[in-house]
Amino acid sequence: MAYSLKHLTEHFEHLLIDWVNEHHTGYFIILPSIGITAIYFLRKHLFRNRKNKGITEIYKTIDERKEHLPLFKIPSHYLNGFLTVIFGGSTGVEVSTVVATAALGNAIYEKEFSAREYKRELVCAGVASGIAVLFVSPLTGWLFAMEVIARKLRPSLLLSCTVSALVAGIFITLFDSQTLLNFSLTGWSWYALPFMLLLSLLGGSLSVYFTLLVIKIKEAFSQINNNFLRVNLGALAVGTMIYFYPSLYGDSYEGLKEVLQQNILNATGISLGALFIMAILKPLAASLSLGAGGDGGVFAPSIVAGAFLGLFFAAACNRYLGTELILINFALVGAAATLSASIYAPFTTVVLVCNLLPNGYVLFLPLLLASLLAKYISKLLLPYNVYSYDRYKSLQTQSG
């Protein structure tokens, strides 16, 4: 399921981008409206106005045990995530995959495939394999399931997630072992470490900015009763951003590759101003996509916005301070810092970012330090994360 969603999304995203570039870039403005409008009608007529609420749905089903993840969550998240991203909605399919695979594990539990106390194990097994295939890393899937979803250490959870990750590893070896980025790292210097730690502070702050945007924009859009206005207000705003900065289209992984290529191989590259603007606009575009009714989460926007921030930071230091910072290293540190602060999972983040490149583990130590520091900074600035268990519990307390 994760494999098909990942590659179908990539394929149709590229087709639409190529079609727009061939005809007229003005179509970028209206494409997100088409995708989110389609999601609105699917939700209304096919899924009976039942809304998707992301990872908090998983916490509710495994912690309270009062409700199950209904089977419709699988096609709902699959289709909605697919339509959001291919038409330019500036999110990613990661959270859609997480909830869909968790719902699959829940469906197996409801069939009494195992003892009744193993609901958490089956849900986490589904999530572990889904994330593993998305990021071509069994260890990433294992860590995400344990660190973010399970949040407990017990033998049955370790066994279920380990078996799931191993099966996903075999699948990856057979069908999909290509990393997201094809760049090669040359190493790093202790001289650059203070700059990396400063960047991690900025990445943590960028994550807080992202979290607050998601919360505030969702609250604001929930007050708009006119469905046509709600969908198009957010979608057209996103489309306008994409028109001026095409790298913001969809999950933006392809845009990130192009920006990295231009800045690493070209002496001039993208301007500092453009890099900074894209780092700020990516969380805004993602928040507007979600507020308008799109499906997705913080994975792709955090990785991409953090990478843009890292590129901007390193290029600015090189230009104005006379340093010789390696741009690709700082792009990865920025991505790790922002993602870790966004999902409150530093160990998952380090392994995930290391697996974005063939030899990413060269940066393991600075990525680990940046991820831990960014998470700490974000918790100081904001006590909960929009998709974290802490956020779920705070909302539960507020509503009694």
Image: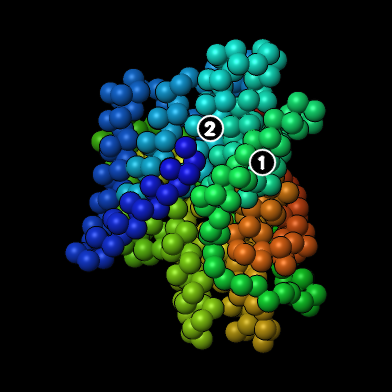
Residue 378 visible in the snapshot:
no
Residue at image mark 1: 166
> Residue 112 in the image: x percent, y percent?
60, 12
User: Marks 1 and 2, Cα distance to the nearest angstrom?
Assistant: 16 Å
Left or right, 244 with respect to 64, comes to: left
| Residue at the image point whose x is 48% and y is 67% from the top | 257
Tell me if residue 106 comes above or below residue 309 in the rendering.
Answer: above
| Residue at the image point whose x is 53% and y is 32% from the top | 101
> Residue 373 in the image: x percent, y percent?
75, 55
Tell me if residue 375 comes above or below residue 258 in the rendering.
Answer: above
Say which quarter of the image contains residue 200.
bottom right
Mark 1 neighbour class, 10 Å CA radius: few under 14, some 14 to 19, many 20 or more: some
Question: Which tag, 1 or 2, sits closer to the chain's start?
Answer: 2
Q: Secondary structure at mark 2?
A: helix
Q: Amino acid at mark 2?
A: Thr
Residue 1 visible in the snapshot:
yes
Say which quarter of the image contains residue 357.
bottom right
Quadrant where the C terminus is found in the figure: top right
Q: Amino acid at mark 1?
A: Leu
> Residue 63 in the image: x percent, y percent?
66, 21
Left or right, 261 with respect to 190, comes to: left
> Residue 219 in the image: x percent, y percent?
46, 35
Q: Residue furthest front?
A: 174
Disc sitting over residue 101 in the figure: 2
| Residue at the image point whose x is 72% and y is 49% from the top | 346
